[in-house]
Amino acid sequence: MKRWLKRPEGSNWGDFGADDQVGRMNLITPERRRAALAEAREGIAFLLGLPLDHPKGQIFPGRFPPRLAATSAGADRPMYDWTPSGGATDVVNDDRVTMDLQYSSQWDGLSHYGACFDADDDGIAEHVFYNGYRSDTHFTQPAEGVAPHAHALGIERLAQTCVQGRGVLVDVRDAGTPPHGRIGHAALMRAIEAQGADVAEGDLLCLYTGYGDLLLRDGAGVNRVALAACPGLDGGDPALLDWIGRSGLAAICADNPMVEKIDGLQRCTGKAMLPLHEHCLVKLGIHLGEFWWFGGIAPWLAAHGRAHFLLTAPPLNLPGAVGSPATPIGTV
Ligand code: UVW
C-alpha cells in the first residue's frame, strides 16, 4: 500500500515496492552474493567489531554500556539446579544483559532515523521514514519485555536479509579536507581509485577513518578531540549525495560514530542536522553501520593489494527494534 502522495526529491520510495522495508539491501542478489563469496580466497577471517566493554564506559552520549548479571532463581539458588530432583551433575550458567542496542559497533535500522516531510502534499509536514512509513501509525513506545517499538522497518527485516555481500574497504584516514576533515565526492573518488577499488551495485562500502583504532588505544569516547582527529563523509556535499544515490551501494559502514563528519551538533532550522543520515536512511533505504573496527583487516588488505572481501554482518533478529549491535566478519 502506497503511503505518500509526494516523495522527497532524490528518494527511491516505491522503487522496491510500496511495502518494501529493507531498501537497497534488495540489491544484494544471489549473483552479487556469489561474487562476494569469491572474495573469500584465503579463508582468513577478521573481526570488524569493537568490544562492548570500553574501559572508560560511555562512548556515545545517552547510550550506556551493557550491564551483565547472572540469572538467578532466587536469593541463594543458581538458575539451573537439577541436582535435587535427579541427582544430575550438570552445572549451568545463564546471563542477563541490559544494554543500549546502539552502543559500540552497531547498525542504524531504517526505523532509527526519520525526517519532517510533507508526504501528503497538503502543506503539513509529517514524521516520515523510508518508503513513507510514519511515526504516528508505525511506532509505539516499547513496553517492558519485547513489545515492538517499530511496527514497520524493524531491525528484524534487516536480519532476514542475512547481510552478506561484498565489502569494499576504503582507507580514508588522510582523505579529508582539511586532513581529518570532511570527505566529499572528489576526495572519496580519489581514495577509491588510489586503492584500486571498484564499487558495484549491492556492495557494502566500509570507510576506515581510524576512529576505532583511537577508541581501542585510548579508550576515548566521543569527544571533541577524538572527533577532530578523524574524518567523516561530508553530508553537505551534493555531489557526494548524488553519487551515493547512483552508486547502488547497499550500505555504508564506518569505524566512526556517525559515518558523516560532525563537528558538534549545530542548531539548524528547516534542514537536517545529519544530512547524510537523512539521505541514506530516509530517502534511499541505505543502512548505516557505525563504530565498526577495521584496524585488523585494513593492513592485511593493503599488504595484499586488495580492497574487496566477503562481509557478513547480520544484526540481532529482534522484532521491533530500531537498531542493533553488530559483530561483523570480513573474510579474505
Ligand atoms: C544518531 O543519529 C543520534 O545516532 P547514530 O549515529 O547512531 O545514527
Image: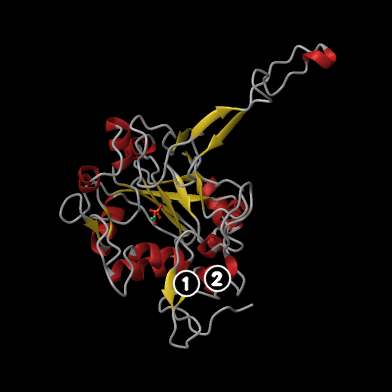
Cβ of mark 2 under 8 Å from ligand 1: the answer is no
Classify residue 183 by image quadrant.
bottom left
Against 254, residue 236 (above or below) is: below
Q: Is residue 218 or residue 46 the one in the foreground?
A: 218
Kindly check if marks 1 and 2 are in contact, taking CB atoms under 8 A apart as contact.
yes
Instruction: Name the residue at the right extreme.
Output: 86
Q: Is residue 220 or residue 174 the one in the foreground?
A: 220
Q: Position of residue 159 (x, y in %)?
A: 59, 51
Disc 2 crowd, CA 10 A, few/some/many (<14, 14-19, 20+): few
**What residue is shown at x 47% (from left), y 72% (from top)?**
127
**What residue is shown at x 38% (from left), y 46% (from top)?**
307
**What residue is shown at x 53% (from left), y 65% (from top)?**
23
The quarter of the picture where the N terminus appears is bottom right
Disc 1 crowd, CA 10 A, few/some/many (<14, 14-19, 20+): some
Which of the two labelled residues, at mark 1 and mark 2, occupies the earlier sequence position? 1
Disc 2 designates what residue?
A: 136
Which kind of residue does numbered mark 1 sit on?
Answer: His
Q: Secondary structure at mark 1?
A: strand
Q: Position of residue 142 (x, y in %)?
A: 58, 54
Instruction: Name the residue at the bottom extreme.
Output: 122
Disc 1 designates what residue?
A: 127
Against 129, residue 329 (above or below) is: above
Ligand 1 image-quadrant field = bottom left
Q: CA distance from mark 1 to mark 2?
A: 8 Å
Left or right: residue 182 versus residue 4 is left
**What residue is shown at x 41% (from left), y 76% (from top)?**
10
Q: Position of residue 143 (x, y in %)?
A: 60, 52
Which kind of residue does numbered mark 2 sit on?
Answer: Asp
Instruction: Name the residue at the front extreme.
Output: 75
